[in-house]
Amino acid sequence: MADQTNPLDDPSADPFAIAAEAASDIHRLTGVEHHDIAVTLGSGWSKAAELIGETVATIPATEVTGFSKPALEGHVGTLRSIVTPDGKHVLVIGARTHYYERHGVRRVVHSVRTAAAAGAKTMVLTNGAGGIKETWKAGTPVLISDHINLTADSPLEGATFVDLTDLYSRRLRDLARTIDPTLDEGVYCQFTGPHYETPAEVQMAKHLGGHIVGMSTALEAIAARQAGMEVLGFSLITNLAAGIQKTPLSHAEVIEAGREAEPVISGLLARVIGAL
Ligand code: HPA
């Protein structure tokens, strides 16, 4: 399973130099020199790619330096360069490496660093997640207002101190609400996974101030901030979190909720990206 040749696995390698190499691969393979916006598509969000604009090129992520094979079927392992009707270049990342794959945090945030090296100033992070607020239903998209990183890890190496105030840009959340004024928001708690949380862990997250539980995004957002990007985060609530919903969680249910919500949330995401 492991692709042993990933240069990010060499501890002496510079992850930013590898991201720069990846960005030059993207330039060579897509013909697009500069991307303005990057978007990572999590479960349920992938149809947005078709709606954002005209696809210039689609490339397998495995052709790009440092990218890993996707761990999960249904997680598309491609990078796509799209041009919006008003001429903005969007890099669509359909190849997320999750923390639970245990390849290390450098691989988790490589796509974000690559997007920054490709020129993107805005990073849109999307995911499928569990909801703690009982008023949310499966299929509800919500904005991420902040996060609690429960991985006990960081993409920052050494004594690198980065401010995370307003990490999930208020400006961009307000802009998203001009497209859909009903969008609610919440604090995202990143657990390591791949197991879902216990009901007690969900209660802990709730007491800590969390509203959304998931297995991605927070570490990526930190890397995006380090790279100087403005971050917009969206969660699709695919289920109520363990113990909030009375029935057991299943991956099939999560995928199904994503599939049902996909047409609506993809349209929303495409419109928000168009307005960025
Ligand atoms: N918890 C963590 N990750 C998830 C969930 C959940 O309830 N649903 C979808 N991804």
Image (tube, helix red, strand yellow):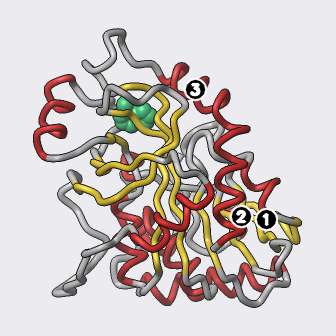
Q: Mark 1 sits on what residue?
A: 59
Which quarter of the figure has residue 132? top left
Other-residue count near label 2 (Cα within 10 Å), few / some / many at <14 / 14–19 / ≥20: many
Residues at discs 2 and 3 in contact (Cβ within 8 Å) = no
Q: Classify residue 52 as left or right of residue 114.
A: right
Query: Please, what is the three-letter code of the amino acid marked with disc 1?
Result: Ile
- Residue 133: image x %, image y %? 31, 32
Classify mark 1: residues with Cα within 10 Å, few (<14), some (14-19) or many (20+). Answer: some
SS category of the residue bearing label 3: helix
Rendered view: 79 above or below 196 = below
Q: From the image, which quarter does the N terminus lie in? A: top right
Mark 1 vs mark 3, CA separation in Å: 28 Å
Q: Give the total number of marks visible in the rendering.
A: 3
Task: Choose the circle earlier in sequence order: 1 or 3.
Answer: 1
* Rendered position, 230 above or below 134: below
Q: In the visual, does 16 lie left or right of 3?
A: left
Residue 90 placement: quadrant: bottom right
Q: Position of residue 75 (x, y in %)?
A: 63, 44
Instruction: From the top left corner, tell me how far across and down residue 169 is, in percent.
Output: 41, 72
How far apart are the two marked residues, 2 and 1, measured between alpha carbons?
A: 5 Å
Write down the residue under mark 2: 79
Q: Residue drawn at (52%, 42%), measured in percent from left and top?
A: 141
Q: In which quadrant is the C terminus drawn? A: bottom right
Query: Which mark is first along the chain, 1 or 2?
Result: 1
- Residue sitting nearer the eye, 261 or 56: 261
- The answer to whether mark 1 and mark 3 are in CB contact below 8 A is no
Residue at the (33%, 41%) spot, across then down: 212
The residue at which mark 3 appears reads as 257
Ligand 1's quadrant is: top left
Q: In the depicted view, which residue is nearer to us: 105 or 53?
A: 53
